[in-house]
Amino acid sequence: MSAARWQQLQLKLPVIQAPMAGGATTPQLAAAVGEAGGLGFLAGALLSPAQIREEAGKIRALSDKPFGINLFVQGRPQPNPAELALALDLLKPWHAELGLDAPAAPDSFCQPFDEQLEAVLELKPAVASFTFGILDAAQMRALGDAGILVVGTATNLAEGLAWAALGADAVCAQGREAGGHRGTFIGEQRQSLRPMLSLTYELAQNLPLPVIAAGGIMHGRDIAAAMRHGAVACQLGTAFLRCPESGISLLWKQALATAKPGSTRLTRAFSGRYARGLDNRYMEEMAQWQDRLPAYPVMNALTGAMRAAAAKAGRGELMSLWAGEGVADARELPAAELIARLQSEWQAAYR
């Protein structure tokens, strides 16, 4: 993405609202961020193509500002039978504790990526971002022909170079501090846990395209630091979770409000892919098994009923309360007010 193309987005502040799948990023949140001068995002990864169209329509009904849609690049999973059997066996006592029937494998583990991508091409958002994998050349050409800017996720230099070679318009540098799922698709996930500033600098020095910093960015001074390390913009997720426009549950918001520094950890136990969230009993008791569980999206589908029942029962110790390392600095403010606060802090950091 050239500087001119980036400027076409007309962002008053170089802030992107992270596309947090699972209901956190509502149309209201994406629209509010756009209206305030940032770039809002729809998290489309867990939505059907019809739901993606519906949610995008809601954003456009609320705002005429540019927005993005994010998808997970993934094929149809073929679970290992032994891993699947182990996971179902391990989930039985958790289901029993919540009064649920014994766990069972669903008919489908994830939404069809090809059909989701077709919906995005039809909708023509300003930006489409991708994680968990990389597009093929034909998909990349289709997005370019539709006039959609493409942002790939990178957790290491090899991934950034792969996106650059494909012709992406920008790369999002996902530092280890980031909440939610790791986007690693080249190498082992635990070997790609670089601090945000270090990764941002390395990618900015070695890639011929703009770099967006993500991970642990909570204040305007963090934005200033990332931009000094070569970022053209910053992607914030946890910072927006306590906004009234966020779609997470009251229980989750209350947990964020009382979180202390150092209260997050990485786990595969909920989804089969490493993700950062508030530490809890389920993570701790499942830690000894997590390396033997089926990969995402299989494990994510298997724990869906448990997580939903836990949320309904107010059992935070059995929920995936995703949050980044900066969670203790999350502020309970409307999105527009948070954007304004970030802007004044960013400008003060430069002064």
Image: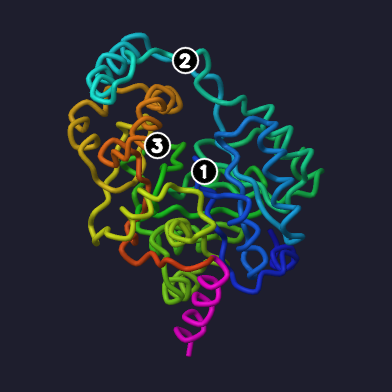
Q: Quadrant of residue 50?
A: top right
Residue under label 2, please give it: 106
The magenta segment is 335-351
Note whether 229 is above or below 48 in the view shown: below
x, y percent for residue 207:
56, 57
Name the image quarter holding the N terminus.
bottom right
Dot 2, how many residues are within 10 Å of its Cα: few (below 14), some (14-19), or many (20+)? few
Residue under label 3, please give it: 187
Dot 1, how many residues are within 10 Å of its Cα: few (below 14), some (14-19), or many (20+)? some
Calculate the distance from the C-alpha at mark 3 to the C-alpha at mark 2: 29 Å
Q: Quadrant of residue 6?
A: bottom right
Residue drawn at 65 percent across, 33 percent down: 136
Side of 27 where 187 appears, left or right: left
Residue drawn at 33 percent across, 35 percent down: 313
Side of 27 where 216 appears, left or right: left
Residue drawn at 56 percent across, 23 percent down: 75
Note whether 283 is above or below 279 in the view shown: above
Q: Are marks 1 and 2 in contact (CB under 8 Å)?
A: no
Residue under label 1, please give it: 23
* Pair 3/1: label in front: 1
